[in-house]
Amino acid sequence: MHALALAGFTIAYGQLPLVGLAPSLSTLALIIGAGLVATLGLGEGRRVGIVIVPGVIVLQGIAVSLGFEATPELLDFQGAWFVFHMTLAFLGLCGMALAFAAGLLYLVQLRELNTKRLGRLFQFTPPLATLDRLGRVGLVSGFSAFTLSIVLGWAWTVSFRHSLDQTNPKIVWAVLSWLVFVAALGSRAGGGLKERRSALTSVIGFTFIIVSYLALRLVSTDGGFFL
Amino acid sequence: MTSIAVVGVSHRTAPVEIRERFAFSDHEAVEALGGLREKSGMKEAVLLSTCNRTELYVCPGSDPDLVAAGEAVLAEKAGGLVGGASQYLYHEQGIDSVRHLYRVVAGMDSLILGESEIQGQVKSAYELAGRVPTDPPVAGPVLHRLFQTALAVGGQIRSQTPLGRGAASAASVAVGLARKIFGSLEGREVMILGAGNTAELVVEALKRDRIRGLIVANRTRDRAQNLADRLDGKAIHFDEMPFSLAQTDILVASTAAPHVLITRDGFRQAIGGAREKPLLILDLAIPRDVEPELGGEANVFLYNVDDLREIIDGNLIKRQASISDAEAIVQDQAHSFAQWHDARDVVPVITGLRDRWGSMREDELEWLWQRLGHLPAEDRELVESFSKRLLNKLLHEPTIRLKERVANGRGADFVDAVRFLHAVGDVAPGADAGADASAASSADSESGPELADLFDRNDTDE
């Protein structure tokens, strides 16, 4: 239904739902939802849906409340480069969202095991090993996609504009987000409690990505701001 | 009233050393059921034999001689017990035996309240009865219906009440914890310290989840070897234990040592720093084998007897609280079974009633034609039709009322009364047997179709 609605938008306005806040948020919600569907084969791992689904609903709710409108044609936002760039960025965020959900549930399950309460929350939450694997897959796939997205954006800008505005909020945000990926993956290195470290970094990192986005959006006066 | 009885022995009536004397292997159970049919002519029988109970369900259970024959089967298996076998046996009859089996299947009568293993054991017991080479089978229509409904009741209680939720034994808690840490237990390494009974049960439960390797460490190598042989593992001496610790995923400690065997410092030395992968330690020993401080180490999850007991008690309290809900389901379903059983009785009675009066109608018509031989054919048809209509109208109301009584669960006395007043069983034994076979072939269905057929016949006759 969601995909059909976005296809309808594309046909009606002759524009992919990758430009403008509402269509972009809706596409992001769709891709994160698809990421959740991909976890269905993971048995109890699919229970990360308890975190993902409300997030998807919030994203879609914001998109609907903003209203879907066509964005005035901008040359920058056309062509295969742009489509790949945005799709990969959304896939990267989807991977981070999955890592966040898995990390959050990992910390909950760890707490249940350490406090030895083993109640309903313990029964519902997937095994630590499953959550750690899901978080790792989310981070690795998300990092790959996000890195590729940044490289594409950088290559396009340098090739066609011959300059890169390093103070542009979307570039600042993209670099910060990429660093979050690096930190989350880096936390898996070494020994000791690397699973717990990774879970914690994923939770903090994803929260940071959201907060930094909102903050940059608030302070930015750039009309053509991303998303 | 249902014609089922159960005679048995369980953890409620006998200690384990007595119960094990009543235990039947599959082969013995098949032989015992075949022998029971041969010697006593028992129509239907199912033998349930688990570590906590041996029960023989028989039908008809209203005949004391047949029930005694069933009891003799159990007594013979137990052999010469001081004071006789009957002191350990209990009996239930009629609807009580139905309620009993429903409670058994739901785990309400189990040593560990709500345990689910019994569901599979009851199913196997019924299937085993199906393998007895008798004709007709000892797993006949009444017991088929009883066991099928019992398994459904067990499932219903487990899904609709918290009776089977949460682990309620050390072994099930251990498996639950291990699964929540490692996900799949396939390929995990387990080490067992000492050779306590509880530890053995825990390891057996873990082995069912296809763990990869098992190491048994003991102060005496011979004892370790014995247990390792039994559990298909590898025996080592205590002194070798630190070398294997780094590879272990689950450690079950259950020695009788008077002091701590694994200290935090010793553990650190054994694994050479921080542990890379999770380790679940179940310290089932009293006094404890593992220093409590070890639980604070990275990736170590330490649970002692008190922790497990607390978890089990918490789950058992929840299970206890759900007994009234489970009991309500048992009562309700036992009532439904009794209705089915009574309805099953009413079918041959109604068939017999109609056959008896139908036969009488034909006799009377024959007598009439001898005296009114001059009547033209169309007048004869009219008289025949009149006699049919009269008979249908006479039998219609009693049939409807009998059906209503049976449906309300109060039909048994009326069925007996009709049988007696109309001498149904005396006149049409063949009809009874036929209806029995019909009911047997549709044991899974409610009594409705058979009754509906009879009423349809009334309508077409008219």
Image (spheres, coloured by chain):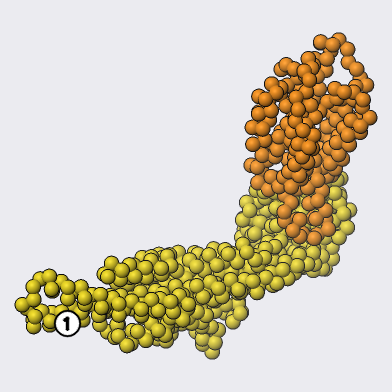
Chain colours: A orange, B yellow
Protein chain holding label 1: B
* Element at label 1: helix
Whether residue B125 is visible here, answered yes or no, is no
When asked about the image quadrant of residue B365, the answer is bottom left
Q: Residue at x 71, y 47 (%)?
A: A47
Closer-to-camera residue (B8/B373): B373
Instruction: Identify the residue at horizontal 58%, vertical 64% (top origin).
Output: B156
The answer to whether residue B428 shows anywhere in this view is: yes
- Residue that label 1 marks: B364
- Give the image location of residue B37, x and y in percent: 36, 76
Residue toward you, A130 or B249: A130
Task: Say left or right for B103 vs A160.
Answer: left
State the image quarter where residue A166 is shown: top right
In the image, residue B335 sits, relative to residue A59, either above or below, namely: below
Task: Tell me the quadrant of the picture where the C terminus of chain B can be found.
Answer: bottom left
Which residue occupies the extreme left position in the image? B374
Name the kind of residue labelled 1 in the image: Glu
- Look at 44% across and 72% down and name the residue there: B340
Farthest bottom residue in view: B83
Residue at position x 58%, y 71% in the image:
B329
In this rendering, is residue A79 above or below B108?
above
At which x and y percent is residue B152? Answer: 53, 65
Quadrant containing the N terminus of chain B in the rendered view: bottom left
Count of numbered badges drawn on the protein = 1
Q: Vertical placement of A214 versus B263: above or below?
A: above
Left or right of residue B103, residue A70 in this image: right
Q: Quadrant of residue A8?
A: top right
**Front one among B278 and B378:** B378
